[in-house]
Image (spheres, grey):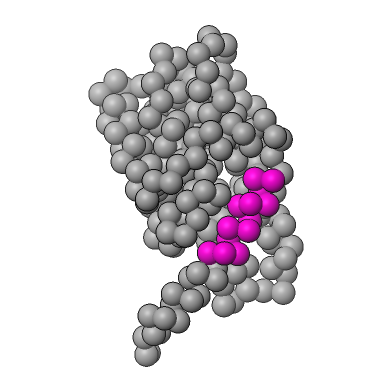
Amino acid sequence: MAAMAPSTVSTMTQTSTRSGDDSWRKALDRLDPDLKTTLKSVATRKVDVVSAVLRAADDKRQLCVRKQWRFTAPNGKVIVVRDVLEKVVSWINRYKAIGDVASQYDPVDAALPWAAFRFLLNVASDDIQAFCLMTTVLEAVARILARSKIIEEAYIYGSNATDIAQTLEEALVLLLADALALLAKCVKYFGRSTGGKFSLEFQLPVA
């Protein structure tokens, strides 16, 4: 099979990127103004922010190995935080394997969730229970971002886009908005110095 010309691949990637960025902007616009402001407060123009997130996640994973951090979930299940962070790394690597366009073309909107990841993974917190709970949120969001990218490329913006692409995009925007809201709530909590109890009641659809 003949290889695609570099210019063709570049054109397809940039077209998909612009469409994908539209989804992120729509998702961001659905947030309450307070949550949107909170999320934008950690925005970064760092090149390849996803790789920075991977490094931060691995650093925290090694810390969890040394500290042997674990916690008991509301359902009574004991969760090893190291295992959760390993899942975070795995989902992010899947996202990158599909194509990390966020850091290449739009380091503001599409990179916002990764900027939030980086902030949360680097934050210093004395509340170990809160940090452990937050890692489960990151794992859920990383899973959603990776699977959403697959849906974008295969069914919405790619060459094989289906006739229900608009319906899929609308559903995807709602899912991404929920994910962004969760990240914003985490950033809001860990970005303040109060001693309040960290509690997130969330139920994300299985992506």
Indicate the position of residue 117 as horizontal and vertical percent values. Answer: 46, 38
Going by the image, does 126 lie left or right of 26? left
Residue 195 against residue 51 in the figure, above or below:
above
Indicate the position of residue 137 as horizontal and vertical percent values. Answer: 53, 34
Q: Which residues fall within the magenta stretch?
A: 17-29
Write down the quadrant of residue 52 in the picture. top left
**Residue at horizontal 47 percent and vertical 60 percent from the top:** 105
Indicate the position of residue 85 as horizontal and vertical percent values. Answer: 39, 36
In-front residue for pair 15/152: 15
Q: What secondary structure predominates along the stretch shown in magenta?
A: helix
Indicate the position of residue 67 as horizontal and vertical percent values. Answer: 29, 20
Rendered-image quadrant of the N terminus: bottom left
In-front residue for pair 76/82: 82
Residue 96 is at least partly visible in this image = yes
**Residue at horizontal 74 percent and vertical 62 percent from the top:** 167
In-front residue for pair 72/205: 205
Residue 102 against residue 163 in the figure, above or below:
above
Going by the image, does 33 lie left or right of 9? right
**Residue at horizontal 52 percent and vertical 43 percent from the top:** 113
